[in-house]
Amino acid sequence: MKKLGVNTRLVHSGEKPCPVTGALRMPIYQTATFVFENVEQGARRFSGEEEGYIYTRLGNPTQNALEVKMADLEGGDAAIATASGMAAITSATMAFLEQGDHVVSSEAVYGCTHSLFKELFPRWGINVSFVNTSDPGEIEEAIRPETKMLYLESPANPTMALVDMEKAAEIARRHNLKTIFDNTFMTPYYQLPLQRGMDIVIHSATKYIGGHGDVVAGIIVGNEEDINHIRGTTLKDFGGIISPFNAWLLLRGLKTLGLRMERINSNCQEVAWFLHDHPRVEKVYYSGLADHPQHELAKKQMDGFGGMISFELKGGFSAGKNLMEELELCSLAVSLGDVDTLIQHPASMTHSVLDEKDQIEAGITPGLVRLSVGIEDVQDIIADLECGLDRIE
Ligand code: LCS
């Protein structure tokens, strides 16, 4: 059969009506454990001889429906749903690393990813080099004999810097590195890293995947072997699994991912040009702008430019603070990818765990403001920003 379109798969993939009750929607299997018919069956399930559920930390039908849908959307063999984006990152990375290993990472990554790599990994004898992964030469130069993993985020939080996925994958293949790619900002609707040579995709599903700002969750997608390895090691023993209720919220959110992303993408284009042309704005970071230095790369590897913009105002931090506090429609809040427009200050909020030197190296200046554009009427978002910009002292 012809492969179904992405919007059809967003609605249907992984879900079938319940054969017992006919319920159209996947039930929330709110259970911790599953009853065995006899001792032999329990033993067969534990040994893997027989398929079937055992205990919700090891698998659950509502989680499974979400995992099947996400694997299909990203073009992977299998997926794992986790308690948060950070649980996805720790489970996916730690499953493949051991004492003495080295990792090369994008220098601009979400703040807690940075602190996990910089503060916690060294405690377990794992060292991470942060480099400008927009430059393939810097990736290659940072690789050592003990390097095992390349960790990438593109577009990066909050600088929007892009990684050329095909070039990075080629370097990783030559050096036998496992590639882990954070696809939170683009979602599978706009970017498919596995098709461009990445090994494992992770998401903070708290963002566009859930889409409504009401759930914290994460996703890991990859090939059968890698996903089974993660499931049998870090997921099982660190235990960062998703709850059935949160899995169900993501199943619901995903049905409208395409509609939300299209709307957010077109709103964001208009907001980006408005900011670009505003006399109080110094610089806009958004790869959808024709004068963005990575615009051509964005067009090559992404099907849309997404909903995230960072910008700097003339007048630096105090002007940004002024603006953020003057807005009425846009909420002053971290997180992103919601139906509502959110604005925040990376240096003092999402990326405050980085010291000043690391912030500057990653391109996080004190005056940088980050906007997550929502699905509201775009003229209302622009009017709110215009009003706020006019009030800057
Ligand atoms: N990856 C990216 C790109 C993120 O932006 C975040 C969270 C995570 C991973 C971690 O996911 P979580 O555990 O929160 O689900 N980013 C946030 C942000 O920019 N504001 O608040 C959280």
Image (spheres, helix red, strand yellow):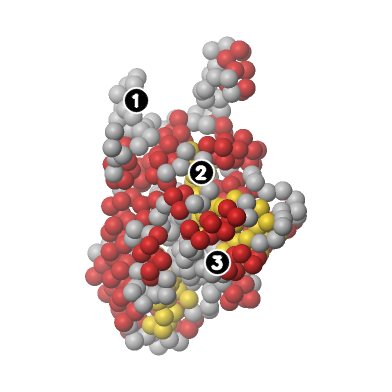
Q: Is residue 103 visible?
A: yes
Three-letter amino acid code of the residue under disc 2: Gly
Cα separation, mark 3 vs mark 1, equals: 49 Å
**Which quarter of the figure is the N terminus placed in?**
top left
Q: Badge 1 is on which residue?
A: 18
Residue at image coords 68%, 49%: 97
Of 292 and 388, the residue lying toward us: 292
**Which quarter of the figure is the C terminus placed in?**
bottom left
The disc placed on residue 136 is 3
Which comes sooner in the sequence, label 3 or label 2?
3
Secondary structure state at the residue bearing disc 3:
helix
The crowd level at tag 3 (other Cα within 10 Å; few <14, some 14-19, many 20+) is: some
Of badges 3 and 1, nearer the viewer stands 3
Look at the numbered disc 2 and say if its residue's Cβ is closer than 8 Å to ligand 1. no
The crowd level at tag 2 (other Cα within 10 Å; few <14, some 14-19, many 20+) is: many
20 left or right, relative to 55: left
Q: Badge 2 is on which residue?
A: 222
5 left or right, relative to 244: left
Q: How many marks?
A: 3
Residue with the most extreme front position: 174
**Residue 235 on image: x %, y %:** 60, 40
**Residue 10 on image: x %, y %:** 33, 43
Q: Are marks 1 and 2 in contact (CB under 8 Å)?
A: no
In the depicted structure, whether residue 276 falls above or below residue 109: below
Which comes sooner in the sequence, label 1 or label 2?
1
In the depicted structure, whether residue 367 falls above or below residue 42: below
**Residue 304 on image: x %, y %:** 34, 60
Residue at image coords 38%, 82%: 281
Secondary structure state at the residue bearing disc 2:
strand
Q: Are marks 3 and 2 in contact (CB under 8 Å)?
A: no
Cα separation, mark 1 vs mark 2, equals: 28 Å
